[in-house]
Amino acid sequence: MTDGMMTRAKAVDEQLSAIADQLARHDAVFTKIDSLCATVQQHSDSFDLLRKSHAESFDILRSSLAAQQSVMAEMMMKLQQLDKATTHPPLLPLPTPKQGTNLLQASPLSPLSLHSSSSMPSTRLPTIDVPLFTGENVLGWLFQMNHFFSFHQIPDDHRLPIAAFYMSGSALQWFQWLHTTDQLHHWDDFVRKLELRFGPSSFANHEAALFKLKQTSSLTAYLQEFESLSTRVVGLSQQSLLNCFLSGLREDVQRELYILKPASIHDAVGMSKLVEDKFQASRSAASRALFHRPPALAPNPSAQRPNSLPIKRLTPTEMAARREKGLCFNCDAKFTPGHRCNPAQFLCLLMEPEDLVSPTEEPPPELQAPSLDLVPEGYLDAETPSISLHALTGQVVPSTLKIAGTINGKDIIVLIDGGSTNNFVQTKLANHLGLTVQPSNHLRVTVGNGDAVTCGGACLAVPLKLGDETFVVDLLLLPIYGADVVLGVQWMRQLGPILFDYGELWMEFNHLGHQVRLKGLDRVQYDSTRPASLRQSQSDSAQLYQLTVEPV
């Protein structure tokens, strides 16, 4: 029993020791917790001190910023008032500030610095280069300088010093002379002296020169001269400028534009270019068709033509003998209606074309007037007579009219052509029409392609009847094709305003107080055929030709 109690006491002691150890460990943990709580409290106190310090610093900064903003606002107001009172824009373009740079720091005197970025966004100014003036094109240079000064808002008293930097050569020497002799006063006085020294004369009547301007060469040259003169004339309306431009054009181009009726000067310029291109293409095509000849092959004496056919020529005596015997002219068989030679004969008919007359050929003596030797010099216009290429060659173009007419009771074909300056008649037709020819060797007519041909003479005061109207015209003799008479500008300008309809082929004008309409002849329509059909018709069909010579 004693042992049992000893054992239980020992167990209790061990339990008490274990409990004491646990209590000791708990005390150590609580001690650490107290230490950590003290540390946390210290950190919390430090954070409170820092927060209070930062709050005080923020308050100081906020007060400082408010004071600075107030000062900046006062400075901006003072700068704006100062700019309105005394400041001027810069004399030359200012360099563009780099991206991200404060406008006030980059350019204190710039007008852009007077406005906040919110009210006026930063824009990059274009680089403007004015060319140096060397004494040429003074009006163009002054135009650029005036716009340069206006763009940069440069005052008048600063313009003369700046202009010196844009002059060189003789112009700079002249400017230096004016400066040395104290002749430079203000910008307007300098402009007047500059125009008198290097520009066209200001005392000339530019308005009269504009009204008298005529196209004598290309349309481009006429446009340049027209624009140069019109810039010197102030006060003309757009309609007056349009009328001046149209009246100075070449007459064939002018008539086309009168039909098209341009509404403005710009429309007239564009239409005139198209019309001139059309005429140029027509002249080029006609020139190639008239003057192009295939190259002739050099003769080769050694080469012999194979299968050459014998050429049979009959004298008038042989032809009379065969006619009496009733024989065919080409073979020895009897000739009957529908006769065909066996073997078939190849017939070649040679004739001299009546219209192919040399340009230098003079009219026959019976056409020359015995009492007059030369055409009077004064009856022609001051300009050289000219004829369009299509009127000379007989080529059909849409801008012409063919009208039936009569001269001395003889029917003729009249070509109305605005591309010809004068009136012309076929050389060999003058005798048939009973006209009196006044010969001349000094008359030369210019063709549309630039060539010149000699005119054999003229027929003055010829009564020409078109429809029911009779006109008295002067005709120059020229070997023309396709028509008997060509009426050009010399006749048309006597009629006043003329209305053409090239689609319906008629022209209308006022003559002797009443309206006259002349109807043109219909254009010839050609039918096409195949080569096989043409050869078949040539071998199978019989044709009969009769030539009758009537005494005149």
Image (cartoon, rainbow, N blue to C red):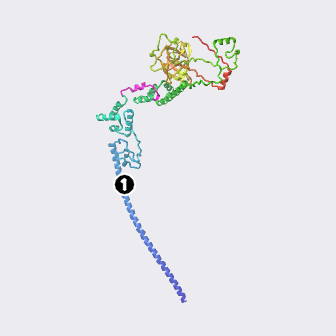
Q: Is residue 208 magenta?
A: yes
On screen, residue 314 above or below 304: above
Residue 184 visible at all: no
Q: Which residue is drawn at the image coordinates 38% and 35% (left, top)? A: 141
Residue span colored magenta: 202-220
Residue 351 visible at all: yes
On screen, residue 367 above or below 71: above
22 relative to 61 in the view: left or right: right
529 relative to 389 in the view: left or right: right
Q: Which residue is drawn at the image coordinates 48% and 79% (left, top)? A: 21
Q: Does the magenta stretch include residue 473?
A: no
Q: Position of residue 499 (x, y in %)?
A: 52, 23
Q: What element carries label 1?
A: helix
On screen, residue 46 above or below 213: below
Q: Quadrant of the C terminus?
A: top right
Give the farthest residue toward the bottom: 2
Q: Position of residue 7 (x, y in %)?
A: 53, 86
Q: Position of residue 65 (x, y in %)?
A: 36, 54
Report the label total.
1
Identify which amino acid the numbered label 1 is placed on.
Leu
Q: Where is residue 134 in the image (x, y as percent from the top left)?
A: 37, 34
Image quadrant where residue 393 sits: top right
Image quadrant where residue 322 sits: top right
Q: Quadrant of the N terminus?
A: bottom right
Q: Residue under circle 1? A: 65
Q: Which residue is drawn at the image coordinates 37% and 40% (left, top)? A: 152
